[in-house]
Amino acid sequence: MKKMDNELLQKLKDWRRDIAQKESVASFHIFHNITLETIASLKPKTKEELMSIKGIKERKFEKYGANVLALINGNLKSDESNVQNKERKDEKPYTISGYLNFLNTEFRRYGARVQGEVNSLDIRDNYLFLSLKDKDDKSILSCFMWKNNYELCGISLEIGMEIIVDGFPEIYPLTGRFNFRVSTIELVGEGALKKAYDKLRQKLEKEGLFSTERKKPIPEFPQRIGLITSETGAVIHDFLNNLGKHGYHTQFVNSKVEGQAAVHDLLSAINYFDDKNIDVLVIIRGGGSMESLQAFNNEALVRKIARFNTPIICGIGHEKDVPLASLAADLTVSTPTAVTVILNKSWERAFNDIQIFERDIIHKYQKVLADRKYQIEIFSSQLKRKSDFIFKKFESIKGRFGKNLVTLDYVFKNAKKILDHSSALLLNNFKKNLDQLGDYLNTTEKRLSVINPMRQLKLGYSITSIGGKIVKSVKQVKRGEEIDIQIFDGKIQSQVNNIINE
C-alpha cells in the first residue's frame, strides 16, 4: 500500500464528523477508520477506484462519493458537506424499488415513540392498519402493525383511545403509501393503565393463575440461579453484591425492563432458561410507576411465568399495585435486595446451625474431657496404692528368695558331688561292659569263620543250584536242564548230560 497522506486523512475525518453530526449518527456509520485510511493511501480519482475499496458500496457512493472524490482532488473543504446535494446529471438514476429501499433503510434510523388518539382501526388476519390523530392540530399518522405484535401487547384498541406507539417510518413499495411501522403499543395515563390492570387481574384470578396451590416451592438450598434484568443501572450490582458467598453459580441474561417494549426481551430471556439447569429463576427491577411497569402487567408474560417449569422469584419494585407478573411468580418480594435475603436465608440458617453444632460439639468434648480427667485422677490414685502394695510384696519375696538361694546353693553343690561320683562309677561299668562285649564278638567271629561256606569252597567244594534252589539230590535234576555251579571265585553254568545214581 502507498504511503498514507495524513493531511488528507485528517480532512476526511473532519468531513465525516460534520456529516455524522448533521445526520445524528455515530461516525462509523458513515465510514470506518480503516476505510478512510485506505482512501488516504490510495487516493482514488474515479468512481470505480473508490468503489474498489472495502466498505464502499453503491449506496455509500451515491450518498458520499462525490464529497470524498472532491476532498481527494482538493475541490472540497471538510465543512462543505452541501456538495452532496448538488445535481449530478452524469450519475446513474435510481430504480423505483432501489430508491424506496434506500429510503426505508434510512428511515429505520428515525425510530420514535409517538403519542396520539386512535382515529381509525382496521384489524385483519395477520396485520392491522390504524391511524393516530394529534389532539392539538388534528394531524394524522397512518400506522401498520403485525397482528402477532399487537396481540403480544395485550391491549384491545378502541377508537378515541389515547396510546403511545413505538416504531419507525417506512414506505410500502407496492402502493407508495407512507406508514409508521408499529412494534409496541402502550396505554397513556395512570387511569387507563389501572383500568386495564384491574380487568386483566380479575380475568387471571378467575382462572386460578395466582392461586397458592399452583405455586412451586423454592428449593431450600439453591445454587444455580438464572437472573433476568437490565445490565445497566444499580439493580444488578445491588443484587450481586448482596448475594452471599455460598457457592452460587449465576447465569445472567440482559433484558429491557422499562415499558411495554420490554415484553419481547423478557419473553426471550425466559425462553432462554427453558432448557437450562437452574434451581430458581430470578426476575428483578427497581421501583417505578404503573406506566414504566407495563411489561410486567402483560398477559403473555404473566402466563409464561405461571407455566414455567422452574420456580420463579420476582423482585419488582412498585408504588401501589403489585405487578401481575409478581402475583403469578412462585414467590414475590418487594425489592431485588429482598430476593437475595430469600436466597441467602437457608444457607445462613444452615451456617448458623453449623456454628451452633460446632459450639455444642466443643462443649460436649470439654465435658467428656473433664469427666475423663476426673476418672484418670481416680485411676491414678488407685494405681499408686496398688503399686505400693506390689512393691512391698516384691521386697518381701526378694528377701525370702535370697534366703532360698543360699539353701539352693548348698543343694546344688551336694547334687554335684553325687553326680560326679555317679558319672565315674557309670564310666567304669561302661568300660567293663565294652571289654566283655569285645571278647564275645571275637569268639563269635572265630566260630563264624569255621562254618563260613566260602572257607569250604576254598577247600575245593562247590554248590549246585537250579533256578536259585540248591540241588541236594540227583532226583532234583533232569537230563538237559541247566544248572549253576558256585565255586570259590565264581559261578559255572552247565547242562546235565547224564545222571548217575549211587
Image (cartoon, grey):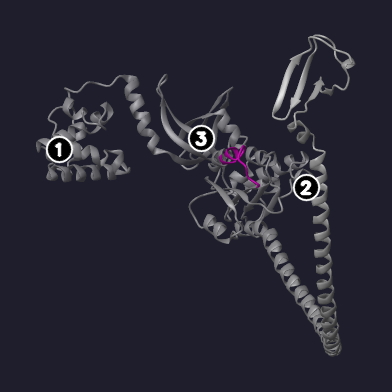
Query: For mark 1, does the 10 Å Cα neighbourhood hold few (<14), some (14 to 19), or many (20 or more) residues?
Result: some
Pointer 2 or 3: first along the chain: 3
Q: Is residue 267 above or below residue 339?
A: above
Residue displayed at 12% across by 40% down: 3
Q: Which mark is residue 212?
A: 2
Magenta stretch bounds? 269-279
Residue for badge 3: 183
Left or right position of 263 against 432? left
For marks 3 and 1, give the CA distance: 44 Å
Residue for badge 1: 41
Task: Identify the amino acid type marked 2.
Answer: Thr
Residue 124 image offset from top left, x and y in percent: 58, 23
Judging depth in this view, the residue of 156 and 206 nearest the camera is 206
Q: Is residue 278 above or below residue 485?
A: below
Check disc 2 and report its element: helix, strand or loop: helix
Task: Identify the amino acid type marked 3.
Answer: Ser
Pointer 2 or 1: first along the chain: 1
Quadrant of the rendered structure where residue 350 is? bottom right
Label 2 vs label 3, nearer the camera: 2
